[in-house]
Image (cartoon, grey):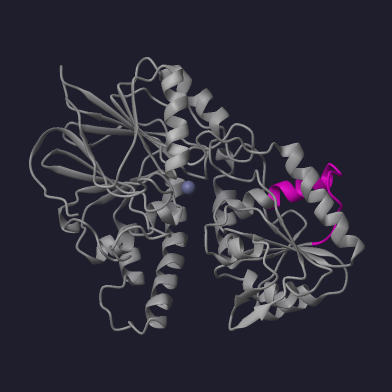
Amino acid sequence: MSVIFSHQPNPKVTFLGAAGTVTGSMHLLQYKDFNFLLDCGLERDKKTELKDDEFPFDPDIIDAVILSHNHSDHCGKLPALARKGFRGQVYCTPASKDLLGVVLKDSVNIQEKEAKHRNKSKNRSVPSQNDAFSILDRCIPIEYGKTSEIRNGVSIRFHDAGHLLGSAITEIVIGKGEKVFKITYTGDLGRFGLPFHTNPSPIPAADLLICESTYGGKFHDDEEKMAAKLDLVIRDTIKRDGKVLMPAFSLGRTQLLLYYLETWMQQRKIPRIPIFLDSPLAVEISRIYKKYGHQLAVDWDSESGNVMILDSWEEAQSASFQPGPAIIVASGGMCEGGKILSHLKNHLDDPRCSIALVSFQAPSTLGAKLLEKKPSVYFHGKSWNKWAEIHEIKGFSGHADQSDFNKLLGPIAQDSRQVRLVHGEPESAKALALELAKMGFKDVKPVRRGESVTLI
Ligand SMILES: [Zn+2]
């Protein structure tokens, strides 16, 4: 598939990623001779032949990127876009801009390491830190609620999506006078039931609503159930004098997890034991969370609590082997990389210990293999016996579930013309489409990759 650029008298959106899957968000909005990207994300579980540094269009023809938030499946391809000739602007919220600096640096590091591993260090198309800087240089922050005309006849306004610090629902108004079109892109939507990030803002009605569908038709566990499950895991591990390992993504999930661990300890919902954090990236990100504390639903400062931060490999090893029970939160939500690996090597075959998985585990990742009912697992050149107890604690997700969708979308059912569902496995997108039809939305469809909608 490759996109042909041409003059578009009416707005046209082509869905280039996150179609029938939850990764690789990227949608092309064309109007007159302007070409905009809504997000520019990496695809984790590849369903295309495109490599991480390839695009189905010529990047130098893109005028601007509108960025919903900083998870790598929404922003991770920005350095590659710059490397391939993109010279436009990136519009996002001020907090997103700050987070982007940290996240892209880390993302480029990983891409460089992977290229080196594949012996492609001389491959000049792999993005570098300079490409990440080039993206930051062209990043223009826009506050929530402020309307900005980014090109003649094209205005955008961000609303808090409540999914992550700085995350935005984008309201786009195109055209002037009698012929005005409205497009709303939800990005990833947050939740009402997990009050750490703010509640998502009302979604503006639109001629075309591009809506995520990750948890369409599903319902998350509530806070009480999550705390009760974790309480059991920790109590059993204390009896065995073991450690509880908690792998967590550094952006958003770690901050949320630490907040809940500390809060539940204060409320005596879980036993009070030491908490160690082994994630330099999460520490950097937590400082940005502190800077924008007024945008959170709670008063939170990672450095004023009881969490002990591990600054070096030696400190991490010492905490890992320190006698007595403790919780170790470490980077690597799906156990595919990150600091969790060295703790897993220390404790996965120790029957006193527990591993509590608090993130979605994509098929074929090490995290998913830990959950399988097989007696062993293979990683880092060795077979491991999995004698530690493995638990999955659901409910920490930052994504809206069906009850949130009902609350957010119900009020705009009569005023929205077309809804296209992205960012969901086919089963979830279909389930959400059915619910939206019941709510009164008239034209709702999950998208297919490469499909376009032209507004008339
Ligand atoms: Zn996200």
Q: Is residue 164 rendered to the left or right of residue 39?
A: right
Q: Quadrant of the N terminus?
A: bottom left
Q: Position of residue 414 (x, y in %)?
A: 37, 14
Q: Position of residue 99 (x, y in %)?
A: 47, 54
Of residues 205 and 99, which is closer to you in this image? 205
Looking at the rendering, which quadrant does residue 56 occupy? bottom left
Q: Is residue 79 rendered to the left or right of residue 258?
A: left
Range shown magenta: 258-274
Task: Examine the structure image and report whether residue 404 is included in the region drawn in magenta.
Answer: no
150 is higher (above) or lower (below) than 413: below
Looking at the rendering, which quadrant does residue 85 occupy? bottom left
Q: Residue lying furthest front in this view?
A: 374
173 is higher (above) or lower (below) than 64: above
Of residues 314 and 424, which is closer to you in this image? 424
Of residues 419 and 79, which is closer to you in this image? 419
Q: Is residue 219 rendered to the left or right of residue 74?
A: right
Looking at the rendering, which quadrant does residue 326 occupy? bottom right
